[in-house]
Image (cartoon, helix red, strand yellow):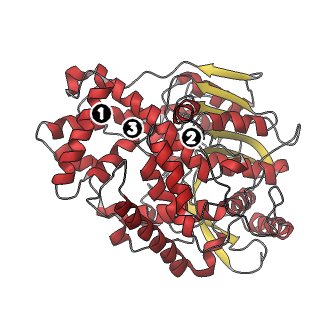
Amino acid sequence: MRAPALYSAAGTLLLTTLTAAPAGSAPGVPGVAELRGTAVAAARAGARGIDFGACPATEDLPGTVRCGTVSVPLDYARPDGRQIELTVSRVPATHKDPNNSKRRVPGQGSLVFNPGGPGGSGMYFPLIGALPEWKRLAAAYDLVGYAPRGVGRSAHLSCEDPKTFLKAPTQAPTHPSEAYKKERIAQAKAYARGCAQRAGDDLRHYTSLNNARDLDVLRAALGESRLTFVGASYGTYLGALYATLFPSHVRRMVFDAAVNPHPDQVWYRSNLAQSAAFEGRWQDFREWAARHDDVYSLGDTAGEVLRSYEKAAARLAAKPAGGTVGPGQLQEAFLSVGYYDDYWPHRAQALSAYLKGDPEPLVEQAGPHPETAAEAENAHAVYTAVECNDAPWPTDWQVWDRDNTRLARVAPFETWDNVWTNLSCAYWPAPRQRPLDVRTGPGEVPATLILAAERDAAAPYEGALELRRRLSGAVLVTERDAGTHGIAGGPNPCVNGYLDAYLLEGRLPVRRAACAPHPEPEPRQASPATKSATDLRRPV
């Protein structure tokens, strides 16, 4: 993930050589034992299938969704050893043409979805078939979601007590003091220890490579000889690993909001590039709010909107709103505007109301929700374990401090928050892998579809370009001048036309294509009452 303009403004961003990976984990050479173990597990799963029935109450899914489980090895080098259960959800194809009620649509098998993260659950994905943008796909495909290993009831991973996970209020200094840095270093070390203590030796098995192997076992359990898959965000990296490991098992694959799969980017440099890109998207939001100063009174320039935000942060540092919303909660809430522009009106309204003396909208949007603490802690634990296990990270704090101090001079909004999110990887107790060299040659896999918004901050556009270079026959469709993180089945009919043509008919543009941006959100005061397609696909 890279934002060239910001890096250029900062000068050359010097990155110290990362710590060496363990011997025997050369890039591009997945373990032979693990590949054999995957074949054994897939054959076993194919024979057993999945017994779909009523979903457990803990999944909070309607009766139209059916649930089941599939067994996968904890360690693919020992396929007959300990097994873990992955939860799976499905809504069968409707076979009803939404444009012609008399026409029966032939089925095309299962469409499997991963929402990203890592740490996101796709269990809610089958509900998306009820939305207009997805009805044609829901007519032809069984919509299948699942919780990857570690997520939810799928070999649940936890690194700390959920009751202490959502700490509030917190600070969010864009230029932290040395004392604050030492405090966060201590927290990162403690979190890494907690992961090791709670998970034990199992911790090393939460990796992207194992997630890709799990996906192949799921494919077999669904009775599919070849996989049809949509991955969003981190799910694109998972899909790219799958295509590299199991090219003959690919039917159709959509990579939505592609992250950069280059081994040198996974994952430390990806987070630097992401932090740089968020500054541009933060600017987009502030310019939008300034154009609607008559509604929000936050200032009629992006600079004035920034000063309004900083004024609110200073007030919250002195007196947290509702006793729980400090600068840290404010920053986290406004980070979402970098992901999805459908948040723009609601965050602007909350900030405006707070500055005018009404803290309630801000408390509602930014305050911690204890009822979601366990789910949030679990998602963060899986995210941390997978990213820390996947690749080498700098183990010297001075590297992190130097790189991010330089970057924060031109991209202060997200840089240090991103450091604190990932810093446990510097002190990680489990062995590190070297990332697989994602690559497919001509004719190895069918043509695949990459979707990318040009100003996506969470998955900067360079990632889509790199993925297209690495997957032979991949075609890129770009939403120009837009930044929503994940555009498949969203508000842009041009993008959806390419998505439907590919998944329903296997048709792709000859080389690459572009769509005009979807309209910017209209200023409004009320929060949306219903979920959008983006909400149901939203990664962690």
Q: 66 or 380: nearer the eye? A: 380
Q: Which residue does the image show at 56% across and 60% down from the upper left?
A: 147
- The secondary structure type at the circle numbered 1 is helix
Image disc number at residue 459 = 2
- The secondary structure type at the circle numbered 2 is loop
Name the kind of residue labelled 1 in the image. Leu
Side of 52 where 346 appears, left or right: left
Q: Quadrant of residue 32?
A: bottom right
- The location of residue 231, given as percent across then percent down, is 62, 45
Q: Residues within 10 Å of mark 2 (few under 14, many from 20)?
A: many
Instruction: Tell me the distance, in whole angstroms, between the alpha carbons under discs 3 and 2.
Output: 14 Å
Instruction: Tell me the distance, in whole angstroms, between the alpha carbons under discs 1 and 3.
Output: 14 Å
- Vertical side of 367 occupied by 481: above or below: above
- The secondary structure type at the circle numbered 3 is helix
Q: 518 or 112: nearer the eye? A: 518
Looking at the image, is mark 3 or mark 2 earlier in the sequence? Answer: 3
Query: Can you identify the residue that label 3 sits on?
Result: 337
Residue 506 visible in image:
yes
- Vertical side of 106 occupied by 293: above or below: above
Q: 482 or 79: nearer the eye? A: 482
Name the kind of residue labelled 2 in the image. Ala
For the residues labelled 3 and 2, say whether their Cβ atoms are less than 8 Å apart: no
Residue 527 visible in image:
no
Looking at the image, is mark 1 or mark 2 earlier in the sequence? Answer: 1
- The location of residue 282, given as percent across then percent down, is 40, 34
Image disc number at residue 156 = none
Name the kind of residue labelled 3 in the image. Val
Q: Which residue does the image show at 74% across and 27% down from the upper left?
A: 507
For the residues labelled 1 and 3, say whether their Cβ atoms are less than 8 Å apart: no
Query: Can you identify the residue that label 1 sits on?
Result: 306
- Which image quarter holds the N terminus? top right
Q: Which residue does the image show at 73% across and 52% down from the upper left?
A: 241
